Image (cartoon, helix red, strand yellow):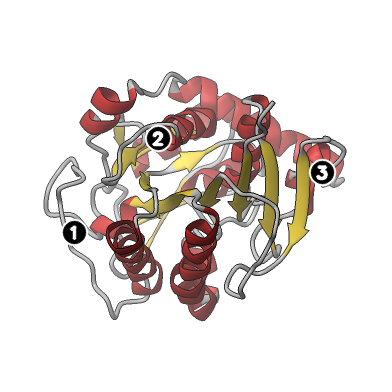
Amino acid sequence: MTITRTLVTGGAGFLGSHLCERLLSEGHHVVCLDNFLTGHRRNVAHLMNEEAFTFVEHDITKPFFTDSPIDNILHFASPASPIDYLELPIQTLKVGSLGTHNALGLAHKHSARLVLASTSEVYGDPLIHPQPETYWGNVNPVGPRGVYDEAKRFAEAMVMAYHRYHGVETRIVRIFNTYGPRMRRKDGRVVPNFIQQALRGEPLTVYGDGSQTRSFCFVTDLVDGIYRLLMSNETDPVNIGNPREMTILQFAEEIIRLTDSASTIEFLDLPVDDPKTRQPDITRATEILGWAPQVELEEGLTRALNYFRQLDVSEGS
């Protein structure tokens, strides 16, 4: 019986750990690679005794070599929240450039298929709505968010160069706002921020007037789309996200309702280059992958809320 070996960089992160679980369930031997810059050991602690799971502590911005065969590489290592990439700008740029280069070199050596975790941030503050994969974006390369946006844009260009020049099998997933269990408490993104504030009865901090929009996809839906992309023949970028769009103010009110919190809403200045709209056009994912999100927002948020409540209990807070 042939064993499929799949390497996941950033495998101890929020998305990476869920991908490791899905791959194991599909019969893959999973090699999880992480340096715990933003990932956490507890995300994969329950997998450590699995016979088909191997953990390697390593920084992918440094070359990684293995003589064992590798069939697939999912390159998910990167700071991914505004707090992370504003505090870790050089590391963000390095993992998008050097890290992607090393992952692609490994894929080339082993004739492996590589999936790049790209982002809706490649569209910047979009002038087209919703955003199709054919849109080239509206990005400020020298703004504070540019370190993440341009790292991912560069990574996409490098992936396509390896695909065209070296014939490496590559896939690019553009990930839109995703939420669920294993998000970090101090992640800095809107879902954990609002949930933590609501559970503590603190004001929910809304930036600007709250009219900016986002679209929220539950993590299991996202992982399903990524796995379908891995197994497909599609080499062009594919948006994966939930097209249900809502304003940040509406989202804050929904969190308060679900938590039955006494929290109020506090309005703060809008961060520099914060996108006004964010909604994926998922036509390509639907037509090519047969994919569409299945988890309704209330169900997903309830599962995320339960996770953070359990985290509070386990940490004694």
Depth check, front residue: 170 or 290: 170
Q: Is residue 115 above or below residue 89?
A: above
Amino acid type at image mark 3: Ala
Disc 1 residue crowd, few under 14, some 14–19, many 20+, Cα 10 Å: some
Report the residue at 67% width, 33% height from top.
Answer: 3
Secondary element at image label 2: helix
Residue 297 position, x and y percent, is 45, 25
The x and y percentages for residue 67 are 69, 59
Question: Of callouts 3 and 2, which one flags the residue occurring earlier in the amino acid sequence?
Answer: 3
Task: Identify the residue position indicated by label 2 in the image.
Answer: 229
Give left or right: position of 164 versus 266: left
Residue 243: image location, x then y, percent: 29, 31
Q: Residue at x 44, y 20 (%)?
A: 296
At 50% from the left and 49% from the top, the residue drawn is 112
Residue 60 lies in quadrant: bottom right
Element marked by disc 3: helix
Mark 2 burial class by Cα count in 10 Å: few <14, some 14-19, many 20+: many
Residue 218 or residue 211, whichever sits in front: 218
**Three-letter code, disc 2:** Leu
Task: Give the residue at mark 3.
Answer: 45
Tag 1: amino acid: Gly
Q: Which residue is mark 1?
A: 137
- Residue 46: % across, % down: 82, 37
